[in-house]
Amino acid sequence: MPTQTRLRLVNGAKPDRLDDSLVAADRPGTRWHLRANWEARLLGPQAPDWFNLESERRAEHIKSGHQRKTWRIALDGDIVFAKVIELRGWRSRLKHHLLGTALAREWRASLRAEAIGVPVVRCLAFGQAIGGPARLVLLTQSQAHASSLVEAWLRCNAEEPADERRSGAAAIVDAVAMLVATAHVRGFVHGDEHPNNILLARRDPPSGVTASYVDTHAARFLSAPIALHRTLGSLAQLDQFFHRVATRTQRLRFLERYIEARRVLGVAGDLPPGKRQLLRRLARVTGRHANRLARHWDRRIGRNGKYFKTIRFDQGWKVTLVLALERRHVFPEAHVPERTEEDWRALLGPILRRVEALPCGEAIDSGGLHAECDRLTGLVQRIGATIGRSPARQVFERCHQLRHRDVHAELILGYGERRRNGLADRTILVRARTPVRPDAKTLS
């Protein structure tokens, strides 16, 4: 029999909607915490099977990550997003039991942020499967006419005429500054102040644009307002985005609105004499933050994950390939799609089978790819490529190291090495078969 227990909102906050309190509800094989006024729609007879959305006709697959899938579901006139995690392997299960999962942390952080008045995306329910595969799901409510900060900014700057573009950018800057200032004054640190983690929703005038946080699993809560010198790290994460796509005037406007919002909220603290002084301090922190990020991204190149994957093919080939581009907002290469491991096997397998018949330095164009083949000659060169870095690997790594630092470079989609008798004897470089930008660096 279904059971239900009424809970209190975190910190005893008053519900902002009729019967918006939280309840705990058990269903066969599942356990839920959810908002009472959504229980009928989320857990009723007509509700989707939230743990098995692959066969749900109302569900649209949005994206996938490590052990995680995100779905968009049309539900009785509303749009609900579902993040589903399946814990595979004993390490993931042990980590969940000891530390909790990102979804559980996001559920708790979202409720706590809502209770202290920090705008966040509205979480509706958190559920766990019991007795079967270890699955968890977090359901959030969609905001009408909402998009990420990146999408909103790019769309705004594509608008004509120029006065509408300027007014739209100003509204975005003001909304984001108010969001960040409110969070800092109320002791909320998001933890990953990436522009894709800020959601903008356009409202009818005079409300303009409103901003809220998403993906709050790394959030921290302090008992007092955050001093300005401790907020520079969060501001630097945003400035990492704005210093590339915004003018100096727009960046100064952001700082001016941020300082103004802190003063209005009653926490001026250790504000500098002017916004230009703050901008200079922020530039130093942003530079250090950018270097740390770039080194972090560099370490991904040799690992299997969301962005890179090393795949073994027949005849001794091992190829490292790009699954997804990290810097789409910096390098908007629409002609380069994201590819799964299966996509790459289908595209690259036939190319590698043709490599054996090619002379040194020849190339193959196939399936939108340009593959350049090379032969390693001499024992010293083969040993060096085997225990060190082959020329193809150096070109591939240099390409992505430059791009991680926002330097335009010719895109290399992959490199591969074939080994015979334990030593590398052939290499391959994979590019997109599209003319490169005139101002791009050539790495080979």
Image (spheres, helix red, strand yellow):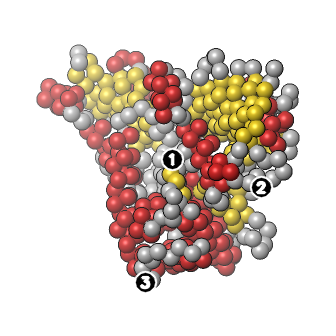
Q: Is residue 405 above or below residue 272?
A: above
- Spot occupied by residue 198 in the image (x, y as percentages of width and height): 60, 56
In this rendering, the label closer to the viewer, 2 or 3? 2
> Would you say 277 lies left or right of 360 here?
right
Q: Nearer the viewer, residue 115 or 59?
A: 115
Amino acid beneath label 3: Pro
- Residue 16: assigned label: 2
| Residue lying at 37% horizontally and 72% vertically, measured from the top left | 281
Q: Quadrant of residue 107?
A: top right
Vertical relation: 437 (above or below) 301? below
Q: Nearer the viewer, residue 59 or 84?
A: 84
Image height of 312 relative to 9, above or below: above
Which element carries disc 2, helix, strand or loop?
A: loop
User: In the image, what residue type sits under mark 2?
Assistant: Asp
Question: Tag 2: Cα neighbours inside 10 Å, few (<14), some, or many (≥20)?
Answer: few
Q: Residue at x 66, y 76 (%)?
A: 167
Identity, as a three-letter code, of the amino acid under mark 1: Ala
Instruction: Where is residue 114? Give x, y as percent.
Output: 66, 54
Q: Give me the disc on residue 273.
A: 3
Mark 1, residue position: 218
Judge left or right: residue 4 versus residue 317: right
Tally the numbered discs: 3
Say whether disc 2 or disc 3 marks the residue closer to the N-terminus: 2
